[in-house]
Image (cartoon, rainbow, N blue to C red):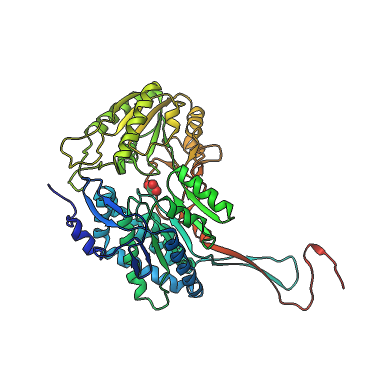
Amino acid sequence: MMTTQTLTSYQQILETLGIADKPGGFAIGSRYEEGNGPRITTVSPIDGVSIKEVGSARVEEVAEAIDAAVEAFYAWRTVPAPVRGELVRRYGDKLRQNKQALGALVTLEVGKIPAEAEGEVQEMIDICDFAVGLSRQLYGLAIQSERPEHRLTEQWHPLGPIGVISAFNFPVAVWAWNAALALVCGDPVVWKPSEKAPLCALACHHLLQEVIDDFEQAPDGLIVLVNGGREVGQAVAASKKLPLISATGSIPMGRAVGQTVAARLGRSLLELGGNNAMIVTPSADLDLALRAITFAAVGTTGQRCTTLRRLIVHDTVKADLLNRLKTAFSTIKIGDPREDGVLVGPLIDEGAATMMEDALNRAREQGGVVTGGERVTEGVPGGAYVRPALVEIAHDAEVVHTETFAPILYVLNYEDFDEALAVQNEVPQGLSSAIFTNNIIEAERFCGPSGSDCGIANVNIGTSGAEIGGAFGGEKETGGGRESGSDAWKNYMRRSTNTINYGTALPLAQGITFDV
Ligand code: SIN
């Protein structure tokens, strides 16, 4: 078999990343523990072969890890932000040195093709660079005071240890989006990764911990990792010692986390499911649209939050585009992601394949016409391999309004642009959206206040593959949170408004006189 990655044996990848002998149930800085929770066997979705067993944390161990992060916070919050940035800069360098090995682990543990796996590590490097620059730009405002000889300002201070709950589909980048910002903002990070990707988490932790070990100002306990299931996630969400919980995953998971955090009046940053649509108008460049649709719908085997799930195509171009898509979907190379030319690797597990099958059966019952979507068993090494599906169906069919984490593209049609916008916005989720058009009025309307209601609205590119420089997240049931670029850093800090009187009188605001 031809492979594009040079690290092929499981053991070699784990050794290169320094985690072959690490227990990994939980880690408090440089202390790695087996944990007393149930053991997790990590199985590669590529071939179903077990990679390594790791432990998991019990609730008391989660509490111990959080306490260590609180201690670390007291030290880290007083380290100047540009010095904190230097730590993150060194982590970026470490990731550059380990890009291929970490990418190979992402491929192994969650089945991404190497280009996407290494792209994910590149996102980590990019967010580190972004955070380093940010470490000198955590600006507050100087505000004009209504009182004489008064100065009114805002300062941004470290918030406290941040809880990060991440999903299997971006097992390294999403934590990095949060961790790089949190660290420059002065916050330790408590990470509860997906049970389906504990090794990626262990590797990210270990690489950063090596940098921390050599960084005098960084306290041990600055990063902690707690592997485990739902009860571990719940313990993280419930901890009053974590002022912010950033959670990525399904809508039911986000609802549970959001309610737990709200009950203790904490902050949550939720990045949940999407049901992303693209409108293709009569003026669209169909060659460009075809490539964008294919990557967005079948890339990462349809397992991105930003995966394209609904195509809203104008009646006049539908037949042509659909024919071309049928050819692309039926010929795209599916198989072991390490094999040259493969663009679609396995689904994460059998459960995902069953959900895809169920969704396609429901689509048929609801009047859909399905092309593709069958299991692929020939020429694959085991695992849950599927052919991406195209489903011609009515826009308001129940199944179309539900996110199924698999490569299913619902093809809907429209006649009138307002109708297309209404269809685009009629689902409960609101993460990403796109339009293909060469008509500037349509493009601007799509991005304007009465256009797409999503957190991301793109023109002439697909719905997935966001750049780290922009704030990432979405509206409605997607949860409303924003992480990564732009001013998302403000989530990780507390704002202090300071009024300073440098005069000798005491004028009160609002013109109040209160002489005693
Ligand atoms: C995701 O978080 O699932 C997707 C990110 C992206 O595609 O940009």
Residue 396 shown left or right of residue 44 in the figure: right
Residue 74 shown left or right of residue 115 in the figure: right
Q: Position of residue 279 (x, y in %)?
A: 42, 33
Give above or below for 117 relative to 311.
Answer: below
Residue 141 shows in this picture = no
Residue 125 shown left or right of residue 152 in the figure: left
Residue at the far left in the pictured view: 1
Give above or below for 136 relative to 47.
Answer: below
In depth, the one of 119 and 285 nearer the eye is 119
In which quadrant of the rendered view does residue 31 lie?
A: bottom left
Give above or below for 43 relative to 20.
Answer: above
In which quadrant of the rendered view does residue 212 lie?
A: bottom left
Quadrant for the C terminus in the image: bottom right
In which quadrant of the rendered view does residue 141 lie?
A: bottom right
Residue 514 shows in this picture = yes
> How many numbered discs sit on the rendered protein?
0
Q: Position of residue 271 (x, y in %)?
A: 46, 48
Residue 300 shown left or right of residue 425 in the figure: left
Residue at the far right in the pictured view: 516
Q: Going 38% across and 30% down the picture, which residue do you hit? A: 410
Q: Position of residue 346 (x, y in %)?
A: 26, 42
Q: Position of residue 164 (x, y in %)?
A: 44, 57
Give above or below for 77 relative to 243.
Answer: below
Q: Going 54% across and 53% down the picture, which residue do you hit? A: 261
